Amino acid sequence: MGWSKDDEPGARKGYHHGNLREALIRAALNLIGEKGPAGFTFADAARAAGVSSAAPYRHFRDRDALMADIAKRGFELFRDALQKAWSGGKPNPYVAFEAVGRAFLAFARTEPAHYSAMFEAGVPLDSAPGLQQAADEAFAVLRSAADALTAHMPRDSRPPAMMMSLHIWSMAHGIASLFARGDAGRRRLPMPPEELLEAAILVYLRGLGITDSK
Amino acid sequence: MGWSKDDEPGARKGYHHGNLREALIRAALNLIGEKGPAGFTFADAARAAGVSSAAPYRHFRDRDALMADIAKRGFELFRDALQKAWSGGKPNPYVAFEAVGRAFLAFARTEPAHYSAMFEAGVPLDSAPGLQQAADEAFAVLRSAADALTAHMPRDSRPPAMMMSLHIWSMAHGIASLFARGDAGRRRLPMPPEELLEAAILVYLRGLGITDSK
DNA sequence: TGTACATCAGTGAACGCGCGTTCACTGATGTAC
DNA sequence: TGTACATCAGTGAACGCGCGTTCACTGATGTAC
């Protein structure tokens, strides 16, 4: 959304289609959002973009290439969202760290199609140039946040940032995929997923000897 | 596995097929295990079971019904596996609780096809009679383990068992779906998933004031 | 024990459908001069 | 500024394929008597 209103008319005025590549990605995102990662075909995307079924081949080798591209863009957006939430550790690392957690779930909720392509569609990380790197960069945001959060601790009692970030990453993904989907029919929860994650992070950090009051 | 060696010869000797229903489920599990939850068709399953493509309709309304049945059986096996790992809280609740965590990952690893059907194939929990209940019972094992683990704590500082079990469930699922898949191309990990989960549970329980030495 | 009959699991042929993919084409765009 | 030409995005017709599903059928099983 957001730029779609400007883009659609803009797309028509070009030569044949204008920007079919973008239109196909947009269409695929809509279809994934509606029917899940397996719920669209190459032909569907073409139809939704208003072109013939042969047109997409000018831009993507096949459906997998389209999905890989979506996953890559997803990780880039994800990285940016986490980065922004971290905001350099302001106002303090503890608060910023929790903001990163919330941003994780917010992304899963507002960009379910990207999220599916990134984590659930089985897209291999080497299936598009830059995909692996984008995924690594997104993870690196969390990882360096963990670094900053533990920087003040004495070396010998400092928990490994790698482990911390894997734990938080896993917990957030677990909650996102079980409870925070826009999908349907999934399990009910006695509280919002954001609160569930926030509580988990709080308990977890306390277990590492990290608290807000410091 | 396990009973398959006895079953296959046994299946041939009956009337037409013997036990086609079971054979179809077995075939579907193999196909899901090989190519993911979306990687098989109704016709594939029939072919793998060595029957005509019309035969499965005698046993399942459609592919979704087959998947729902697999998910239900999966939750039943899962419940039993968690129950067994908990083993009534022996030798002590803390140790038994960690065994439940390990059993979670072990299930995801040894029964990837069941696990997919249960958590990743998007099977609605109301799509088969008994499915919801089987899922609830599996979760209930973890939930009552959390109850037992906190039973000795004073009422006012006792963490809610519901929250605890949702956290552990989410963490285990997150680790399972990100790192413990037999699949392919998934992310590398500097340690076995079991250790990652064990460390997470340890830190988490410490954060709640629960330790082994008690 | 034997016979007649109902039941029921699996057959195989058939169908419509939509997908993926190829192909020669067309018509708009960009550019050399 | 104008003309000729190369490039390139999208067309539309065509194809083979496999899937889902239906249908009248067949042949084995179970059972009533």
Image: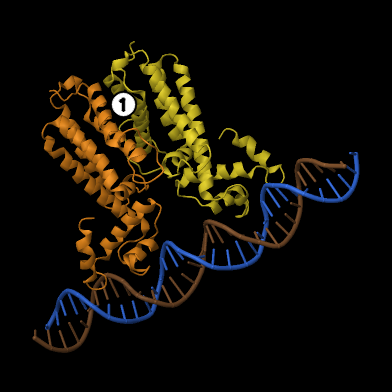
Chain colours: A orange, B yellow, C blue, D brown
Q: Position of residue A89 (x, y in %)?
A: 13, 35
Q: Secondary structure at mark 1?
A: helix
In the rendered image of this protein, does residue B183 appear above or below residue A2? above
Task: Name the foreground residue: B37 vs B183.
Answer: B37
Q: Position of residue B145 (x, y in %)?
A: 41, 21
Specify the quadrant of the image occupied by residue A204.
Answer: top left
Specify the quadrant of the image occupied by residue A190.
Answer: top left
| Left or right relative to A185: residue A89 | left
Can residue B30 be seen at all in this image of the molecule?
no
Q: Residue under circle 1? A: B200
The residue sitting at 44% across, 27% down in the picture is B140
Parent chain of label 1: B
Label 1 neighbour load within 10 Å: few <14, some 14-19, many 20+: many
The residue sitting at 31% across, 53% down in the picture is A68
**Total number of numbered discs in the rendering:** 1
Can residue A196 be seen at all in this image of the molecule?
yes
Image quadrant holding the N terminus of chain A, namely bottom left
